[in-house]
Image: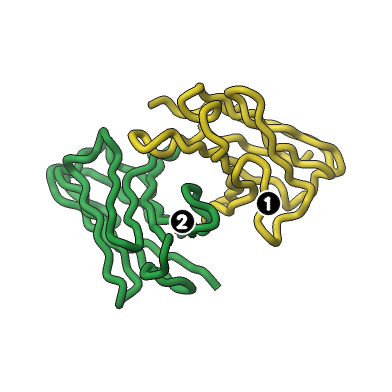
Chain colours: A green, B yellow
């Protein structure tokens, strides 16, 4: 059974750095072709893709957020970590991680339930 | 990159069919056969219903079907059931520069 779960702070202050962890089970990020992405959804707005990391450690970032994002993985812990620097109230959103298996690449199949992050002083 | 355009809401009675449109551009929907659809119930994780425009993952009822014409993709739910009431989002690959573009979301109501 594939599951993903996002974790991190519910509240961050403007200018702080956000660190989110995606802990998954039911698959391995060392499997050839496997990838994990981060997506977010501001309240009442559309989903927005943020970043992706591949089994071979290739990394891809949203062009508009590239300078603020870092994605990394710990294969032994089945975790993917996303950091976003210089947080702003417009970054308030539900943050999701999702799996992209080789059969469905580039489309994600399983998603986590998301974690709401509020940026406020 | 703008979000893909979906109707805000659609509704139908049990047993009827509803169709949700997802309009993009030649840089996303029209340019690739990588359109996917997700169902999301309140407080739950999005669930993949359609991928590669018209393919269904195992376990998804064949009441759900997808298609594409030009820059517009569509999701059709036939034989509408109460449990189909949820939000639905489309997603399209948009090239290695933009990667993914998502739809604005459609709320399906079963009357």
Q: How many angstroms separate mark 1 from mark 2 (CA)?
A: 15 Å
Q: What residue does disc 2 label?
A: A100
Q: Residue furthest right?
A: B15
In this rendering, position of residue A3 left or right of residue B39: left
The residue at the point 24 percent across, 44 percent down is A119
Q: Quadrant of the C terminus of chain B?
A: top right
Residue B51's x, y, as percent? 60, 46
Residue B11's x, y, as percent? 74, 34
In this rendering, position of residue A7 left or right of residue B73: left
The residue at the point 31 percent across, 76 percent down is A77
Q: From this viewpoint, is residue B43 visible?
A: no
Q: In terms of secondary structure, where does tag 2 sit? A: strand
Residue B50's x, y, as percent? 64, 47
Residue A120 against residue B10 in the figure, above or below: below
Q: From this viewpoint, is residue B79 visible?
A: yes
Crowdedness near tag 1: few (<14), some (14–19) or many (≥20) residues, C-alpha within 10 Å: some
Q: What residue does disc 1 label?
A: B56
The residue at the point 29 percent across, 46 percent down is A60
Q: In terms of secondary structure, where does tag 1 sit? A: loop
């Amino acid at each position: 059974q594939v599951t993903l779960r996002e974790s991190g702070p519910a509240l961050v202050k403007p200018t702080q750095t956000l660190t989110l962890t995606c802990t998954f089970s039911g698959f391995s990020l060392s499997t050839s072709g496997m990838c994990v992405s981060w997506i977010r959804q501001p309240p009442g707005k559309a989903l927005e893709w943020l970043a992706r990391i591949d089994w071979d450690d290739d990394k891809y970032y949203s062009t508009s957020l590239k300078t603020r994002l870092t994605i990394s993985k710990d294969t032994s812990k089945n975790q993917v970590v996303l950091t976003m620097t210089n947080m702003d109230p417009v970054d308030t959103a539900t943050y999701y991680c999702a799996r992209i298996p080789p059969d469905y690449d580039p489309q994600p199949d399983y998603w986590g339930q998301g974690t709401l992050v509020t940026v406020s002083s | 990159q703008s979000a893909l355009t979906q109707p805000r809401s659609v509704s139908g009675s049990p047993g009827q069919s509803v169709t949700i449109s997802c309009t993009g551009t030649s840089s996303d929907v029209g340019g690739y056969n990588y359109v996917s659809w997700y169902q999301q119930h309140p407080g739950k994780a999005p669930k993949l219903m359609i991928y590669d425009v018209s393919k269904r993952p195992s376990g998804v009822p064949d009441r759900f079907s997808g298609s594409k014409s030009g820059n517009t993709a569509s999701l059709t739910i036939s034989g509408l059931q109460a449990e189909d009431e949820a939000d639905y989002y489309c997603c399209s690959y948009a090239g290695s520069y933009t990667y993914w573009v998502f739809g604005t979301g459609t709320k399906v109501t079963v009357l």
